[in-house]
Structures are given as structure tokens and as C-alpha cells.
Image (tube, helix red, strand yellow):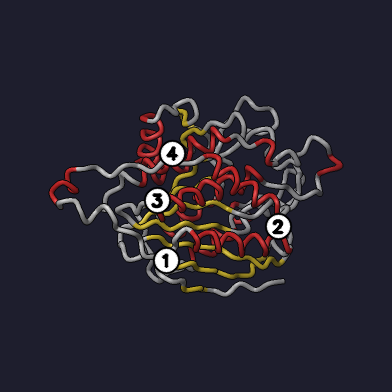
Amino acid sequence: MKKLVYTLILSLVVLSCKGRQTQAPAIQDAVEKAVPVFCADSAYNYVRKQTDFGPRVPNTQAHDDCGIWLAAMLAKFGAHIVHFQNFDTKTFDNTTLKCVNIIGSFNPDCPTRIILCSHWDSRPWADNDPDPSKHKVPVDAANDGASGVGVILEIARQLQQQAPEIGVDCIFLDAEDWGPGDDYKGQHLEEYWGLGTQYWAKNPHVEGYKARYAILLDMVGGKGASFSREYYSERFGKQVVDKVWNAAARLGYSSIFVPRKGGAVTDDHYFINTIARIPAIDIVPYLPECQASIFGPTWHTTSDNIDNIDRKVLEAVGKTLLEVIYNEKP
């Protein structure tokens, strides 16, 4: 299989300053920077492209090919440096995985940084599928993985066109979803999940790395999705939760970003909080009325495919995050 180089230094992207030079500084300072327009169709196409590779399960060709494409897209959208963080890891079932976290840094010289992150791997088994014969089939992971990545790629495209006042690191985390299912007979431990995040939190891509906060996107495109204030997010980053949910409310998305408390989810943000000590929140579905799963009916099933992705949900998440990013001050 292809081996990705640890760090690839890319050419600096020179942003056009046309139009700015003709304005007097006093006028510039008086005008508040506009928030770019999030394109849901664009984000949807990035989700579809990932699923076109097939399930992105570590140790497969689809996984390797998609990883190369993701890095190329970050570079295309103006990431000044793209880091390939290669690592081997052992899973709960003693499988050795060859993995890579992919990090694109925007405005890398700015000391005030935030993180946008999502896992990009697919679950190797559809073990929550209503059809038991499909429990060993890998998942397309259109929602559980690709949706968050698709939203972040569209945000990255906007970062290139209009630079915010802060630095943004877009991190695609590997090996999140190789955890035990309900049929596992051993002890369920939190460290069985988020293997790529645990590695990054212990070995950040920049020595002494610090960020103001991190926002994790997980399953942010499913039909009928709504997001509550997840327990660990409130515990470690309540101010960040407030910031995001208030932005969503201003934009009219309170029916999707619901102002209620959700459950505790062992997700990538848990390890960013507890290992990297960076306040991190999780935008993740909470649907207690759904009999199949609180994460929605397609969670860990073969129905987690492009047909069940809703552009309106992608748009609500993307527009909310752009509102947050472009109102963040150094």
C-alpha cells in the first residue's frame, strides 16, 4: 500500500489584495468583515467523492486513495502546510492498523488558533444493521465520517477566498471507528475508540502546539439530524458550546442546534480534552426518540450512504461554523 510522507511543505498561496489597496485604512477598520457564503452543494459533492472511493477502512486501498485526495484538496484550498502524520496502532481486537492523520494549516503564523476536526475513516462492520447478514459488511460512512470532512473542506475553500483574523487547523483524524460493538464480550474501554486522536493528542503536529478550542464534527449530514449540548462538551468547553449554539440561533437554526442537554459520547473530542488539554466540543446527533440509535437510523448500518445525506443539515452546520470563525478575534 502507498506510504504517505510525514510532512509535505507546500508553496505559500499568495492571496489577492485587490480592492483593499484602494480603501483608506480608517474606512477598512470601520467595516466589519462579512461572513462568506457556505455552499451546501459543494459540501455534498465532497461527501459523495469520499464515498465514491468505497469504505475508507484502514489497511485498504480505498483508505489510502482517499487520504491522498484529502491532502490534495487541502493544498488546493490554500493550506500553507499539509502534515501527514503516519502511525501504526493496535485495536481492541489486536489488529495492527496503518493510519494517517491529515492536517491542513491556514494562516499558520497566527498564534491564535482553532481546530476544526472530523474522523475520515469508515467503520469496518455494519454491526447495527437491522439485517444480521450484513453485520460484517463495511460501512460507506457518508454521514459517520464523510459528512464532517465534507463540511470542513467547504469551509477550507472559503478560508482561501477570504482569510479570517485567526489561524485555523483542519484535522482529519484516522481510526476513530474501529471500536467494539454490542456483541463484544470483553471490557468496553474508552481508549478503544478515537485511536488517531489519541495519537495526535500525544504527538501534536507542531511541537508545543496550542489552540484556543476545537470543534469536532461527527455525523453532521443525516436526514432529520438535530444536535444537543453533549455532556463532555459542556464539561470541558461550555463557553465554546455557547458560542456555537448562539451563532446557530442567530442564523435561525435552533431546530437543528437544539438548546437542550444531550448524553455523554466517547468521541474524538474526549481525547482532545483529556490528553491535549484543549477545550473541545462535539457537534453530534442526539435523537433519543430513534429506536435504532440515538445517533439516528443509519448509524453503523449499510444505509449510511449518500442517499441519506441532507444538504440542509450540512448547510446549517457549515453556516454556523463560518459565523463562529469570522467573528473570532485574535
What type is the residue that disc 3 sits on? Pro
In this rendering, the label closer to the viewer, 2 or 4: 4
Residue at mark 2: 57
Pinpoint residue 38: horizontal percent, then vertical percent: 45, 41
What type is the residue that disc 4 sits on? Lys
What type is the residue that disc 1 sits on? His
Asked if labels 3 and 1 touch by Cβ distance under 8 angstroms, the answer is no
Which sits earlier in the primary sequence, circle 4 or circle 1? 1
Residue at mark 1: 80
Asked if labels 2 and 3 touch by Cβ distance under 8 angstroms, the answer is no
Residue at mark 3: 279
* 219 horizontally vs 103: left or right: right
Mark 3–mark 4 Cα distance, whole angstroms, equals 22 Å
In-front residue for pair 260/66: 66
**217 to 18, vertically: above or below:** above
Pinpoint residue 269: horizontal percent, then vertical percent: 49, 50
Quarter residue 235 falls in: top left
What type is the residue that disc 2 sits on? Val
Quarter residue 56 falls in: bottom right
In the image, what residue occupies the spot 43% across and 54% down? 115
Which sits earlier in the primary sequence, circle 3 or circle 2? 2
Which sits earlier in the primary sequence, circle 3 or circle 4? 3
Which sits earlier in the primary sequence, circle 2 or circle 4? 2
Mark 3–mark 2 Cα distance, whole angstroms, equals 29 Å
Crowdedness near tag 3: few (<14), some (14–19) or many (≥20) residues, C-alpha within 10 Å: many
